């Protein structure tokens, strides 16, 4: 617990929502330090060594909702100010389903992707009801400086040009032990140099998942000016029409089966076959389009 109440800025979003990029921008402020990516399955004890006027805490919605995290740190004596990163969930899904950290599992630490997205939806509904600040990632891509300025104003923060010029090094950030791998590989020396255009099409989303995403998030899509319908290049090529959560992809399964090499190897081979089948389907789809 802090010695005196200080402001803790809590930022949350789904994995693959662009939240790590935004987190890096806020941590470049001269008056702020904290966590680039806090663990999503643990409520960290905030380090007393963070002596900046404002503390930043970014995490992803997986095991906890943002509203759960806000309540916890209020209980710990912090003044909290929340920020929710919003992105078209169909693009989030399409990215997550092919990433090693997008574990579509069945455990508490690696819950099914649909469970994570429902938790995000509940957070979005609460933020909307309470009129708490939200940052739409697509708006940020279109005009990053303006989007950051608006986010600062909604959080009661003055503008800091370091948010776009990135004067701090990795070593000056209090906690960078974790972080989105895509961001780590694509990060350059400024926001402008790092920005990349968004992919226009879905390539990994199966028909059943796309149908569920568009039905479950119909109001969300409408309120955030997202298209009612999107197409996926592999939706018609796979016999399995939705992704099935599996225990075999979870970290708990890896820890358990590592002590038994043969079952572990069998599971890994099965997982590799499924990944290969997905990759071949995507290639076939691209060739068919051409």
Image (cartoon, rainbow, N blue to C red):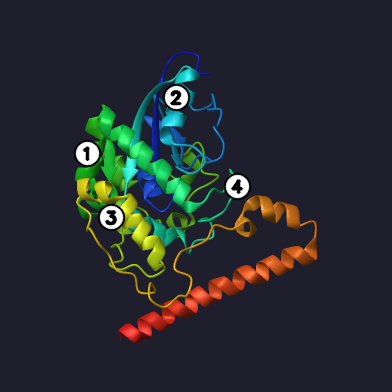
Instruction: Report the Cα–Cα distance between label 4 and label 2.
Output: 23 Å
Q: Of circles 3 and 4, which is in front? A: 4
Which comes sooner in the sequence, label 3 or label 4? Answer: 4
Coordinates of residue 233 in the picture (x, y in percent): 35, 74
Which comes sooner in the sequence, label 3 or label 1? Answer: 1
User: Which residue corresponds to mark 1?
Assistant: 149
Residue at 53% over, 26% down: 49
Q: Is residue 275 visible?
A: yes
Q: Of circles 4 and 2, which is in front? A: 4
User: Which residue corresponds to mark 4?
Assistant: 107
Labels 4 and 1 touching (C-beta < 8 A): no
User: Which residue corresponds to mark 2?
Assistant: 71
User: Which residue corresponds to mark 3?
Assistant: 192
Is residue 186 found left or right of 164 in the rendered image? right
Residue at 41% over, 54% down: 16
Which comes sooner in the sequence, label 4 or label 2? Answer: 2
């Amino acid at each position: 617990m802090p010695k005196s109440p200080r402001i803790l800025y809590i930022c949350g979003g789904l994995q693959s929502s662009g939240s790590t990029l935004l987190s890096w921008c806020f941590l470049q402020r001269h008056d702020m330090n904290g966590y680039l990516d806090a663990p999503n399955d643990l409520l960290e004890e905030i380090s007393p060594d963070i002596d900046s006027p404002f503390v930043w805490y970014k995490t992803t919605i997986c095991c906890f909702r943002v509203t759960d995290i806000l309540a916890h740190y209020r209980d710990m004596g912090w003044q909290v100010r929340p920020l929710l990163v919003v992105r078209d969930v169909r693009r989030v899904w399409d990215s997550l389903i092919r990433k090693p950290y997008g574990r579509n599992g069945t455990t508490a630490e690696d819950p099914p992707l649909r469970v994570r997205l429902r938790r995000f939806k509940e957070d979005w509904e609460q933020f909307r009801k309470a009129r708490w600040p939200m940052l739409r990632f697509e708006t940020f891509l279109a005009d990053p400086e303006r989007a950051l300025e608006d986010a600062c104003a909604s959080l009661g923060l003055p503008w800091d040009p370091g948010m776009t010029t990135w004067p701090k090094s990795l070593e000056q950030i209090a906690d960078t032990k974790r972080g989105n791998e895509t961001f780590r590989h694509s990060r350059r020396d400024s926001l402008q140099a790092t920005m990349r255009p968004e992919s226009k099409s879905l390539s990994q989303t199966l028909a059943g998942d796309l149908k569920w995403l568009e039905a479950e998030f119909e109001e969300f899509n409408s309120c955030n000016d997202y298209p009612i319908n999107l197409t996926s290049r592999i939706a018609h090529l796979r016999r399995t029409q939705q992704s099935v959560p599996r225990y075999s992809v979870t970290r708990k399964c890896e820890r358990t089966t590592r002590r038994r090499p043969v079952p572990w190897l069998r599971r890994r081979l099965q997982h590799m076959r499924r990944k290969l089948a997905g990759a071949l389907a995507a290639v076939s789809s691209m060739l068919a389009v051409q």
